[in-house]
Image: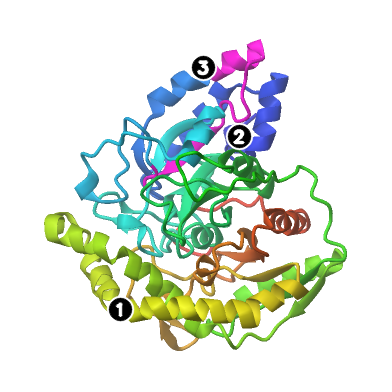
Amino acid sequence: MADKELNYLSATAAVELFRSGQLSPVELLDAVLKRADEISDSVNPFADRYFDDARERAKKAEAKYRNGSARRLEGIPLLVKDSSAIKGIRATVGSLMNAGRIDDHTDPAVERLLRAGANFFARATCPEFCWLFACHSRMWGVTRNPWRLDTSPGGSSGGSAAALAAGATMLATGSDSTGSIRQPAAQCGVVGYKSPYGRNPLDQHSSFDPYVSVGPMTRTVTDAALMQNVMSGPHPLDHNSLRKRITIPTRLGDVRGLKIACSMDLGHYLVVDDVRREVAATLDTLSDAGAEVIEIDVNWAGEAIRLAHMSEEFIFFGVLQDALRDHADQMSDYVPELYQTASAVTADDYRRCLQVAGQVWNDHLGPLFKQFDALITPAVSCPEVPADNWQKDIIVVDGSEITDTDTAMTALFNMFNRCPVLSVPAGMTDRGLPVGIQIIGRPYDDVMTFRIGRAIEERRPWAQRRPGLSYDAG
């Protein structure tokens, strides 16, 4: 099998080939690492690399398939975001201030992937403190979108999304507090899953932040389910992890008879025409498959969206304050700007966020999910975000000036964090950038989001598309 075929092989298919003896974990890893070297300078999705250790693990995985002791993800290349702790190595969270820090524990969900045999070979880049909708830092430089190198892969899980799109890993992890899995998944044309709060265990530093989630990033919905089934479930060291484990089944059924709501803009976002066109085409495929798709009027989300962003900034303010006080000379240029934004949020704003969340759920989203099985919106309203964009940089869209924060249609569903959200590819813009949609399920109805995502993937197949690694739309 040619390298390029191996680079875009699904993890599910790779496991089957390993078991049949038609493919070796060593052969697959060699193709992935070769591709990683090819794209490192142009896309720059990698932080620390552990290629030699991964080669040794691949050889051991090969032996395990021969003797019948292979685990669920044995030998599948895994990229881990540079914010997740792994015992004995560093997670810099994109910051020079953490360059010498070595973690003494492994994040629970990542530990499960490693114990299932996934072959960790590198860290994925993220912006400093995971706090941009782009992906660059003094620590790791600029990560670019392989579909068009002048544009951003999104943030903060931009390295994971870019590497997947470029064929330089099979599996990757992401984290999401205002859209940091779904937004880069949409920007790069891959799949990303924000699990509902408590489904995937977190470590002691994150488990009491209700906005935060860790989850899988892959190229197919089936692979996302494979990863999610390994990552999820209760953990004794996470007080908030759910006692009940949910398994995403291999057979999900069709969408006939489902009732799906959709909103192109949530009554708040400026959505460009070609994103609207591709989302509409995706919704048409669901209608053709037997679902009832109804566009709803949303006139209640604007304040909640604004407060969702502010609430996370309020929670994060202390981290930025301490970093600038103790390590100002090591910060990326945009960190003072992030601090300025976060310091403007007050305790009254945070309390207002809690009040508005209750009102919106009681009056609008709660009744919506009584009537509909899921809600679909674009994940990104306009993907034309420069690779080196900052939080307050102006982007002109249809004559209006906005920021990258105004393009990510995700934060509302971190506020309503019990809702699972799956981001899947939904076409291409006229200038050669992916379009993504997010499928929002009822609280803790993980399976429904995957059921709809799989139906879309089957009817609008994406996996054979390949980015051009160029600076233009050609």
Q: Secondary structure at mark 3?
A: helix
Q: Quadrant of the N terminus?
A: top right
User: Is residue 37 found left or right of 249 in the rendered image?
Assistant: left
Label 1 environment density (alpha carbons within 10 Å; few <14, some 14–19, many ≥20): some
From the top left corner, tell me how far across and down residue 151 is, in percent. Answer: 43, 64
For the residue marked with disc 3, what is the amino acid?
A: Lys
Q: Earlier in the sequence, mark 3 or mark 2?
A: 2
From the top left corner, tell me how far across and down residue 150 is, in percent. Answer: 41, 63
Q: Which mark is residue 346?
A: 1
> Does the rendering let one see residue 404?
no
- List the residue tagged with mark 3: 59
- Quadrant of residue 171 within the rendered picture: top right
From the top left corner, tell me how far across and down residue 467 is, in percent. Answer: 55, 53
Q: Secondary structure at mark 2?
A: helix
- List the residue tagged with mark 2: 6
Q: Earlier in the sequence, mark 1 or mark 3?
A: 3
For the residue marked with disc 1, what is the amino acid?
A: Thr
Depth check, mark 1 against mark 3: the one in front is 1
Q: Residue at x 69, y 26 (%)?
A: 17
Label 1, label 3: how many angstroms apart (C-alpha)?
A: 54 Å
Q: Residue at x 36, y 57 (%)?
A: 130
